[in-house]
Every structure is written in structure tokens, then in C-alpha cells.
Amino acid sequence: MERKNSNVMKEIVSALNGADTVRIITHASMDGDAFGSSAALCHILRGLGKRAEILLEDEIPGNLRFLDRNYCVRESGLPEEPDLCVALDCGALYRFEKRVESYQKGRNTINIDHHEGNPCFGALNWVEPDAPATGLLVFLLIRAAGWEIDAECGEALYAALATDTGNFQYESTNKECLLAAAELCDSGMDRVKVATEIYQNCRPEQIAIEAIAVERMEYLCGGWASLSCVTQEMLRETGALMSETERIVERLRGVRGVELAVLIKEEPDRVKCSLRSKHYVDVAAIAASLGGGGHKRAAGCTMRCGLEEAAARVRAAIEKEFADEGRDR
Ligand code: 5GP
Ligand code: MN
């Protein structure tokens, strides 16, 4: 398929080909798409004989560590001004707050992403809000360049596609994405291993915190919305990590009749919210009204206030959305 962005894709391929040192950056609190697309690109670049690294500012979630083959550093091992810095899956600079300076040190900067409203902060920007995952863009890039997708690259890209599409459930899962996933099966990667590592390998602490969050779930708007929270106290009580609370919001949305689900997470210095919708609510718009952003069916925001105040603001936003939807119907 001819893409509207095929020119920028070619420019990116040529920038990558011409670089010897490449720093890859993805957003903090990495998910499967963020880390999978980064691991895939790093692997490819190293295979081409380049010095490439993924610069991190926080931990790799436990269920994604199998994708790391020594790609990651906390202190850059590259020259201070590498030839190229590539941001993957970052909708805005503040999603990699502590590494913005390191990113901007690149002699050239690339931004590959699929978030609506990405302000195109790189020198070269390839932003496709309709793409189901950044991993799909990296796949298309690699294919366009004619680089070989081996098993390591294949499993990283497959992990990216699978996680950002809710295992190929969400409506963003288009034919191109399914064909890409099918093609990745030819790379020699082990799809069952990827699924087991990501989804069937959690620590008991994770199940324990999921149980408490589900127990505390409340329904709003007569069962149209569901809401729960994760507090620091719950983390202490269960021994779970915040990165192990990822699946909870999917459980909240999974209830019959629920269109909108919100999980409010209390962090030491701020509150983060995860919003999900099932069929029609634009959660990116709700998140934007709370200072965040994201995709139509999966979005988030960060609030600098206490849990109670954050919860009150979120409840008000949900109720407003319900009232507005009611007027439309
Ligand atoms: P999650 O709920 O999994 O943390 O995030 C879902 C999506 O919401 C992410 O892919 C990202 O697009 C968006 N998102 C999450 N947190 C924030 C945030 O603090 N600010 C903005 N602008 N988007 C966010
Ligand atoms: Mn993504």
C-alpha cells in the first residue's frame, strides 16, 4: 500500500543508514509497544553494525524483560552528541521528561509515533494516529529498507502489535496490522513464548493487587462507567509494583454494559489515570480535558494533586461525558 507518509519513511531510512551512533528513547512507564518497537529497532541497527542503545529512565516492566538483549542503558555509552536520536511511541516530550536533553543532543532527531496531537518535536517526524501501534510503523520501516526481520526482531515487533491492540481485539486492529503479524510468524519467532511471557507469567503480588482493585470497583452513571484506584497503601499491602497494575483497567472495562472505565493510580508525587472505552466514547478528549491525551479508546492523564481531588475531577468528567452522550442519543 502506498502511504501518505512514504516520503518521510524514505528520509528516515536514509538517516538511519547514514548514522553510526543511534540513541533510541521511548516513553517512561514503558508498555509492550514502547519497548517492543525500541528493541526491534535497536536489534536491527546493531545487526547493521551500528552502535545503538535504548536509553532508559525507569525500569523495564517484568513481563517485557525477555525482549531485552542488552540493548538498554541508563547512562549513555555513546558520544554526547550521537548521529541520531530516535523517539518511539512518544506522544509528547514530557512522556520522556528526564531524557529530553539527551534526545535533543542528537545531530539529527527522529520522532516515530501514533498518538493524536503529537507536536512533531523531531527534525523528522512520522506520526500516524490511525496506526494501531508504533511497532507497525517500525515494521513498515524495516520492510521498506529491506532489512531482514529475524526471530529476535520478529518477537519484539509481535509483542508491540499484540499489546497495543489488546491482542488484536481493538478496532484499531486493521488488516495491515494482521498481515504484519502474519508475516512476523515467518521470522522464526515463537508466538506462544511471547504470549506466555507477557500474559501468563505474572507474580502472585500482581493478582493480589488486581483482586483488591476489582473489589473496590464502583459503578457510575447506572453501570455505564466503572472506576477504581490503586493507592500506595495497596502497593505496600500486596508488595505489587505500579507496573503490575496495567491489566486492571481492562478488567474494569470488560463488564457488560460498561462503556467507560477509569483506573486512578496514586504515585508518590502525582496521580495518573488510565481511561478506556469500549465502543464510542472518545477517551482522548476526556483525558485532554484533564490535561492528558492518548487514543480514542485508550488514554491517560497525569494530575499534580492528591488522590481525593483527582478522583473528584475524574468523576465529574465521567458524569459530564454521560450527560453529553445522553443529549446526543
Ligand atoms: P495507559 O493508561 O496505558 O498508561 O495509557 C494509555 C494511553 O494514554 C497511552 O498510550 C498514551 O497515549 C496515553 N497517556 C497515558 N498517560 C498519559 C499522560 O499522562 N499524558 C498524555 N498526554 N497521554 C497519556
Ligand atoms: Mn503505542
Image (cartoon, rainbow, N blue to C red):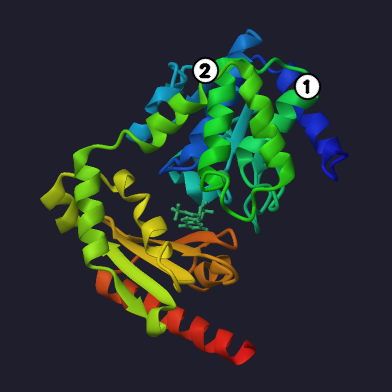
Residue extending farthest to the bottom is 327
Q: Are marks 2 and 1 in contact (CB under 8 Å)?
A: no
Residue at which label 2 appears: 78
**Residue 263 placement (x, y as % from top left):** 36, 63
Position of residue 298 relative to residue 54, above or below, is below
Q: Amino acid at mark 2?
A: Leu
Query: As rendered, which of 327 and 141 lies closer to the eye?
Result: 327
Q: Earlier in the sequence, mark 2 or mark 1?
A: 2
Position of residue 113 relative to residue 23, above or below, is below
Q: Amino acid at mark 1?
A: Ala
Query: As rendered, which of 60 and 306 lies closer to the eye?
Result: 60
Quadrant where ligand 2 appears:
top right
Identity of the residue drawn at 73% across and 29% down: 141
Q: Is mark 1 within 8 Å of ligand 2?
A: no
- CA gap between label 2 and label 1 equals 24 Å
> Can residue 81 be seen by looking at this rendering?
no
Residue at which label 1 appears: 145
